[in-house]
Image: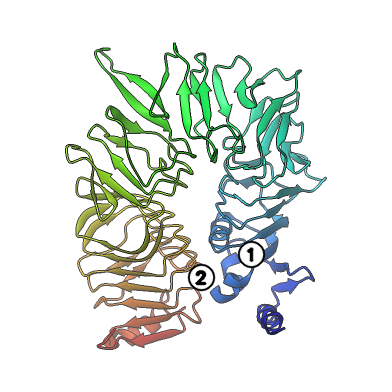
Amino acid sequence: MMKKGLYGTIIALILATSFYSCNNNGIVTVKVEKAGTLAQQCSGQQWSLIKKLAIEGPLNEIDIAFLKTLDCNGLECLDLSKAENLNDIQFYFDSNLFTSVTLPDNVETIEDEAFQGCLNLKEIKVSPNNTHFKSVDGVLYSADESKIIVYPALLSKKTFTIPASVNQIGNCLFAAAYSLENIEVDKNNKSFCSYNGVLYNKDTTSLVSYPAGKKDDSFTLPNKVVNINWSAFWGARHLKVIKVESGNAFYTSTDGLLFEKNNAADNDYQTLSLVAFPPGKTAVSYKLPDGVTQLSTCAFKTCQIDTLILGKDVHFIDKWAFNGSGIKHFEVAKENISFTAESGLLFKGNSVYLCPPALCGDVYIKPTTTIDERAFQRSRLSSLRIDPTFVTGPFFCSYCSQLESVRFENGTKEANGLGAFFCCPRLKSADLPESFEKISNRMFFGCINLQKLIVRSPRVPEIDKYAFTGVDFDNCIVYVPANLINSYRENKDWNVFKNIKPLSDNE
């Protein structure tokens, strides 16, 4: 009863503003009167409590970006049926809690990977008035059923049959659909075929999708295949070994890993690009075979090894190679001239290149020349301390759902580029040094729980557009040098914060 009473109090607080209403199912409705103002409709604390959300009124790209914050914060259901101006859905959801979405009548296009990370998605709803899309047994199709757009990951089907009308399939369509054991194809379909429950194009030269729920622990790639969809093996957690039929001119297998052959221009030697590390292959530590030179997009998607050791030949790593993996540490052979590892982080020269996706806890970054674009994106660290850094790349620490505190040491002038801490909903405190000169574009966009911002600069830093969108200006306390209190309070960009206080000696 206490829990129910507390929830009632929380909902009452949310309903204190006229922009909200709540039905008996706990769905909170937010009404937007002007596009671009969604984040302003309530405080950060209120946003963080909403699990079921319906939005009415006009939206724009800033509102859509803000929805990403709520998605990262554990939003379970989103009803956009009464949203306006939402002709294109070009944003990507990536929430393990997201279960349901309702699309508005006016949506005309949806990106193929729009819901790729929604591992608990059960349903996509669309109004019968929508002339561009339709839902059939929980699966989203184009209105003429020529393309499958979204297959919810938690559909309970063990077998799904591609209808005869379908000639296009969205990327990542069956990724992490763990119940799906077989993908079949209607015999009259002219674009696709199925062999042993695996989906290919009609002449079997392209592997489209291996069912994530297939129970086999081994798969052999036919020798006719010349192309593999980059999401083909996502979530196939039973699959431990991928083999390749002899005679395949494009692919090969070593130690159960799938590689693409790369012939040098002079044909004197051959190098290997890792295409897929079988998601079911487990190891505490794994060293890549010699001769591997490149790691392709999502090559380690959903793999669950703790430590990955890169060999001496690896010289190119796609930024998305480890997206969604369970890797906690990187190690690099000392002979490798392209990469090094320190404290589990991957460096390229004097730049932080990549943080292992599953690295947890507190991270300290030594003085560096640069932190690369998206180097820490979606990592699980809880705190970050950064020694003087010349350049930080765009979105270098974005979508970090566990990050609570960050501190820049003196010497760093700004977090360059877009969205340094974009959509970090649990970020509570940030400490900026005396050398800091500018709060860059979207730096704290979507940090709905930011409570403490320390600004040590002897001058009032500039603020770029959307730097604090979604921040709770009523409850976030900004600590600044005592002699600058009035300057902050009179500054049109800073005076939106209601609590500007002097720095104390122990801050």
In this rendering, the answer to whether 81 lies above or below 160 is: below
Q: Tell me what residue is drawn at x 41 percent, y 44 percent.
A: 322
| Residue at image mark 1 | 34
Q: Please indicate whether residue 219 sits to the left or right of residue 128 in the image.
A: left
Q: Is mark 1 on a helix, strand or loop?
A: loop
Badge 1 or badge 2: first in the primary sequence: 1
**Residue at 43 percent of width and 74 percent of height:** 428
What is the x, y in percent for residue 19? 69, 73
Which residue: 54% across, 38% down? Answer: 238
Q: Rate crowding at label 1 as few (under 14), some (14 to 19) or many (20 or more) other CA atoms within 10 Å.
A: few
Circle 2: residue type = Ile
Quarter of the image with the C terminus is bottom left
Query: What secondary structure is found at the residue carrying circle 2?
Result: loop
Give above or below for 459 relative to 101.
Answer: below
Circle 1 or circle 2, nearest the eye? 2
Name the image quarter holding residue 70: bottom right
Q: What mark, if any, has residue 319 been given in the picture?
A: none
Alpha carbon separation for disc pair 1 and 2: 20 Å
Amino acid at dot 1: Lys
Q: Name the residue under label 2.
A: 448
Q: Which quadrant would residue 320 be assigned to in this image?
A: top left
User: Where residue 269 sits in the image (x, y, percent)?
Assistant: 26, 16
In x, y percent, where is residue 494? Answer: 41, 77
- Tag count: 2
Q: Residues within 10 Å of mark 2 (few under 14, many from 20)?
A: many
Query: Is 282 or 344 nearer to us in this picture?
Result: 282
Say which of 102 and 198 sits in front.
198
**Quadrant assignment for the N terminus:** bottom right
Model colouring: rainbow
* Spot occupied by residue 90 in the image (x, y as percentages of width and height): 57, 46
Residue at (28%, 17%) from the top-left corner? 264
